[in-house]
Image (spheres, rainbow, N blue to C red):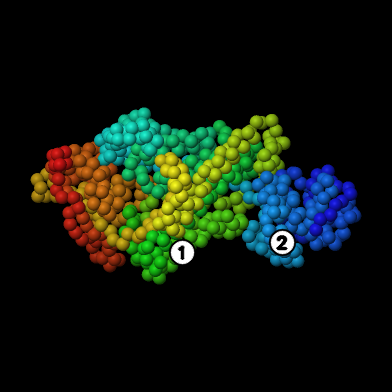
Amino acid sequence: MRSRVSNPPPKPLMIWDGECHFCKMWIERWREITAGKVDYATYQQAADQFPEIPLDQFKHAMAFIEPDGKTFFAAEAVYRSLQYRSSRKWLEWSYDHVPGFAAISESAYKFIARHRSLGSSVTHMLWGKDAQPPTYFWARRWFLRALGVIYLIAFVSLWVQVDGLIGSDGVSPVNQFLPAVHAQLGKDAYAILPTLCWFSTSNAFLHFLCGGGVVLSVLLIFGIAPALTLIALFAFYLSLTTAGQTFLSFQWDVLLLETGFLSIFLAPWRLWPRELMWWPGSRPPATAAPVSRAGLFLLKFLLFKLMLMSGMVKLTSGDDCWWNLTALDYHYWSQPLPTVFGWWADKSPEWFKHFSVGLCLGVEIIVPFFIWAPRRPRLIAAGLMIFLQFAIAITGNYCFFNLLTIALCLLLIDDAAVGIPRLREAVGAQMAGAPSPRRAGCGRVLPIRLRNYAAIAVIVVTLPINAWLIFSAFKPRARPPHALANVYEQLEALRIVNGYGLFRVMTKGRCEIVVEGSADGLEWLPYEFKWKPGNVKRAPGWCAPHQPRLDWQMWFAALESPQENPWFFGLIVRLLQRSQDVNGLLAHNPFPDKPPRYIRAMFYRYRFTTVSELRQTGAWWKRQELREYLPTVSLDQLRNP
C-alpha cells in the first residue's frame, strides 16, 4: 500500500507504534543502521501531522515518508528506509525486482504484526535485550593481543630449535636447500619459495628473523602500529616457514599465516591506536576506529572454513571409524604427542568415547553455521568450539593450534555480550562513510575506507577459492575449474588461503622409531628424544604450546620408509658427526664425549598400558620390537653410498 502526504518532512521519517515492545527493539537497530539519515517518531507523536493517513493504518503497520511526500507501509516501509545504508540497498532492489520477494515479505510482516508478543519473545531469545547491530571493539582488542601472544610463542618455540633443524649444522640446512632449488628452478625459485632467507641463509640471519618476530609480537601485544606490525610478522613467519621445509609444514603454521594476513584488515591503521589500550569495563575512546566489517568477515569465514572442513574431511575420507564413532578408541594413544591426561582419557568407558566422537563431529560440522546467527546462538557456538579446543589441548600436544582457534572464536563475542558501552555517535557516522562530529577534520576517514576496500578486494579474490576448498571437503575427488586452480596456484606459496582437516584418517596403530648408536657394533645405546615416546616408564609429557618439531617429524617418519623422509638421513649424519645443534634437540645423548661409529634405527609397536600394568610395572607404555627401520650405517657409508 502506498500513498502521498501533502506536508512531507524535510528528512525521511519512519513512524512506528511507541507502545509496541517488539517495534521498539527493532527501531533501535534500524536507527543505528541508517546512521542519522532517517528520523524516527511514534505515531502517537506524529499522527496529527499527516491527516491523510488513517489512525488505524498507523496502528497496524509502520509508515515511511519520503521528503517528496511518497509514503510506504509495512515491509516495504522497512526496505525503503534501509536503502539509506549502502550495504542494505539490495533489500529494496529485491522487493522491486525479485519475483515473490515482496509477497513473502508482506506475508511475514503481517504474521509478526498479528503476533507481536511472539516476535518479541523470539527476538529476546535470539538477541537478548539488545537487538542493535553488534560492535566488536572488545573482540578486536583481545583478538589482536591474543594473536600477538601466539606469534610470540611461535617465534620463541622455533628460535630455540632453529639451529638444530635448518641451521648450517642442522638436520636440513637451509644454506644447502635454497641454493639447490635456485640451481634447479632459476629465478622462478623466488616466487615458488618466498622468503627473506634469499638475502642470507646464515644462522645469524635465522636468529634475526626469530628475534625480530619476538620484538614485533611484543609490539602487537601492546597495540603499537598493529597493521604495520602484522605485515612484518607475516613476512618474517612466512620466511621461516618457507626456509623450514618439512619442519614447518604443519596446518597450524599455515593457519597462523592466513590468520595473520587477514588480521591486517581488522587492525586499526594507526601508529598508536588508543582503542586497543583501554582498560576492561571502561568505554572505548570516542575516536575509536570502527571495526572493519569486511575484515571481520574474512576472519569469521576463516573460522567457519577451519571447523567445517575439519569435520567434513573425516566423514568423506572413507575411514569408517568416524562413522561408527570408534575414532577415540585409537586416537588417545596413536596421536603424535599425547599428554598424561590422554592416557587417562583412554581408560574412559567405550560409550563415553563414542559420545565424544559424535560431539566432536557435531561441533565441527553443525556448530560453525551458527557463526552467522544472532547473538545468543552465536555465543553458544563460540562456547562449544572453545570447549572442544580445550578438550583437544588437554589430551594432546598441538602447540599453538588450539590457542589460535580459540583466539578466532573471540571474534564471535560482541561488545553487548561483555557489557561494553556502545559508541553510537562515533561508530554510526564512520560506518556510514563520513567522519563523526568528534572526529571531523582529523583526516582519518580515508585510511578506514582504504582498509575496507583492501579487505573487499581480498574477499573477491579468495572467496571463490575458499568456497571450492570447502566443497572439496564434501567431494574430495572433484577437480577445481582451470581458472580457479591457476589463481590458487599463484597464491599457494604465500599461504594466505588454505584447506584444513586434521586426522581425516585415524591412525590405528602406533609405531615408534628408536635411534641407537654403537661404538663397536655390538653394544647399542638409544638416543632419547625430549617428548616423543621412548623409555616406556617415562610418562607422556605436556609441552604445548611449544612444538618440538623434530619429535613431531619422527611420528610422521614412522608412517613411511626412510627413503620417503630424506631429512631422516640428515639426522643420522649429524648424530654421527656429533653435531651440538642437533644433539640439543634431544633429551639424552648416550655419546657425550665421542660420536658413535655406527647408528641404526629400530621399529617398535607402542601402546598405552592398562591401569593394572602401570601399578605393577610403573610403565606408561608397552612396546613390541618389530624390525629394523634403518639398517646399521656408518658415516663413511652415508658419504659414499
Query: Residues under labels 2 and 1: Cα distance?
Result: 40 Å
- Asked if residue 382 can be seen in this view, the reply is yes
The answer to whether 384 is drawn above or below residue 420 in the figure is below
Residue 359 got which mark? 1
The answer to whether 274 is drawn above or below residue 369 in the figure is above
What residue is rendered at 45% in x and 38% in y? 234
What residue is rendered at 62% in x and 41% in y? 290
Viewed as shown, does residue 579 lie left or right of 27?
left
> Which callout, 2 or 1, points to the residue nearer the camera?
2
The answer to whether 205 is drawn above or below residue 553 in the figure is above
- Please state the horizontal and vertical placement of residue 133, each as a whole percent of the image: 65, 50
In the figure, residue 312 lies in which quadrant? bottom left
Residue 90 got which mark? none
Viewed as shown, does residue 246 lie left or right of 14?
left
What residue is rendered at 38% in x and 60% in y? 317
Graded by Cα atoms within 10 Å as few (under 14), some (14 to 19) or many (20 or more), the crowding at tag 2 reads: few
Number of numbered discs on residues: 2
Name the residue at the front extreme: 482
- Please state the horizontal and vertical placement of residue 2, each as a whole percent of the image: 81, 55
| Residue at mark 2 | 103
